[in-house]
Amino acid sequence: MTAPKVLLGVAGGIAAYKSAELLRRLTETGHSVRVVPTGSALNFVGAATFEALSGQPVHTGVFSDVPSVQHVRLGQEADLVVVAPATADLLARAVQGRADDLLGGSLLVARCPVLFVPAMHTEMWEHPATRANVATLRERGSVVMEPASGRLTGKDTGPGRLPDPAEIAELARLLLERADALPRDLAGRRVVVSAGGTREPLDPVRYLGNRSSGRQGYALAKVAAQRGAHVTLVAGHTAELADPAAVEVVKVGSALEMRDAMHAAVKGADAVVMSAAVADFRPAALAAHKIKKDGSEPEPLHLALNPDILAELVAAREPGQVVVGFAAETGDDTADVLEYGRRKLAKKGCDLLLVNWVGEGGAFENTENQGWLLGADGGETQIPNGSKALLASRLWDAVAARLA
Ligand code: CTP
């Protein structure tokens, strides 16, 4: 299989320095990347950096390498265009269809998915001119990412930060897997996602935990936010994942903390997805001090049953609210993964259940995932292997269809 061709446009903003890391991630994951900066981007990062990291020449204007008609060829050949950072000026120029540099020309020629990743000051992002430009680009079929919130170039903070390069790379891969994975069909919706594993404390230094990385739940939150939803992510322990852009993150430790956070977050929500690996049991007693060994046999560990948060959320479901559960199954001699999934859907009473296989090499600690999406209406859709973001996009398709 030939490497997917990505055209990485870089506009002239301070976040241009992060495009070097994005470039590295894209090349390391097997993409062939051609970097097309604007002239002003080269004030922030030198062409040599992009050339060395991409292994390809870097030009900004339409008069370089004229015989190969680059301003037409690069856009035509691309499987995906990512513009990161996309400044307010770049967005305005893209709306106007300006073609007086190589990036502008390439954007006009490209017929592949286009991902703009804005980065600018909050005032610029919120200005009616930029809002209108973003709306126009989205109407024309481009994906314009919601920026992250946080520290900007000066002392100010607010929406307008470039999202984490890993998150941009994840969405870029998603658009290559599925060009229409990020419609704005969750705009105006409020969704709640739980992710990661809970930690059940035994004493101040020890806990019972599990192998969940949180990646699937984080992918669900990212994809929902980029499809326009207001997202609350209730996160247990994860593999040190960065907070997704434009997502409200609530960090919790134990199952009991997750239960409280979920009950608070789901009030008025349109959809709830329980993808967290909630511990079924917790140590019955929490020691106030570190348990010491004294040479004798240790006491047996007594466990108490944790509440089933998903079952509680189903019982408390508000009218029209869509509740989605996950099932982590290995299958055994008596029933396979899918059969266990069907039983769990019936038992839990949720609207949708995503059944995962979690044996060796399965969903845990893996960047890929696959499974079956089972509906309370009897629908069964197989989700072939792909990125966790791809699985997330399929799940939100089903949720959006139920909300519509
Ligand atoms: N879940 C929950 N609260 C629990 C246990 C699980 O909300 N105490 C949720 C999970 O987030 C998931 C679903 O229930 O959405 C199924 O989790 P899973 O571990 O597969 O099933 P269990 O109910 O624990 O059943 P079993 O372990 O017997 O397979």
Image (tube, rainbow, N blue to C red):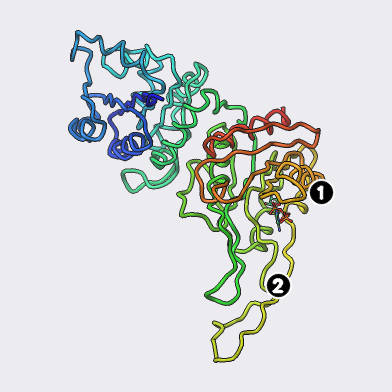
Q: Amino acid at mark 1?
A: Lys
Q: Quadrant of ligand 1?
A: bottom right
Q: Which mark is residue 372?
A: none
Q: Which mark is residue 347?
A: 1
**Left or right: where does residue 230 sit relative to residue 307?**
left
**Left or right: where does residue 31 sit relative to residue 192?**
left
Helix, strand or loop for disc 1: helix
Which residue lies at the image location 48% right of the left edge and 48% below the top edge? 243
In front here: 68 or 224?
A: 68
The mark that comes first in sequence, 1 or 2, is 2
**Left or right: where does residue 125 sit relative to residue 105?**
right
Check the image and name the residue furthest to the front: 333
Q: Which residue is mark 2?
A: 303
Helix, strand or loop for disc 2: strand
In x, y percent, where is residue 187?
60, 30
Measured along the vertical axis of the image, is residue 131 above or below residue 304?
A: above
Q: Quadrant of residue 256?
A: bottom right
Check the image and name the residue furthest to the bottom: 295
Q: CA distance from mark 1 to mark 2?
A: 23 Å
The C terminus - image quarter: top right
Measured along the vertical axis of the image, is residue 205 above or below residue 360?
A: below
In x, y percent, where is residue 240?
46, 54
Q: Quadrant of residue 220?
A: top right
In x, y percent, where is residue 350?
77, 43
Which residue lies at the image location 42% right of the left edge and 32% below the top edge? 125
Q: Is mark 1 within 8 Å of ligand 1?
A: yes
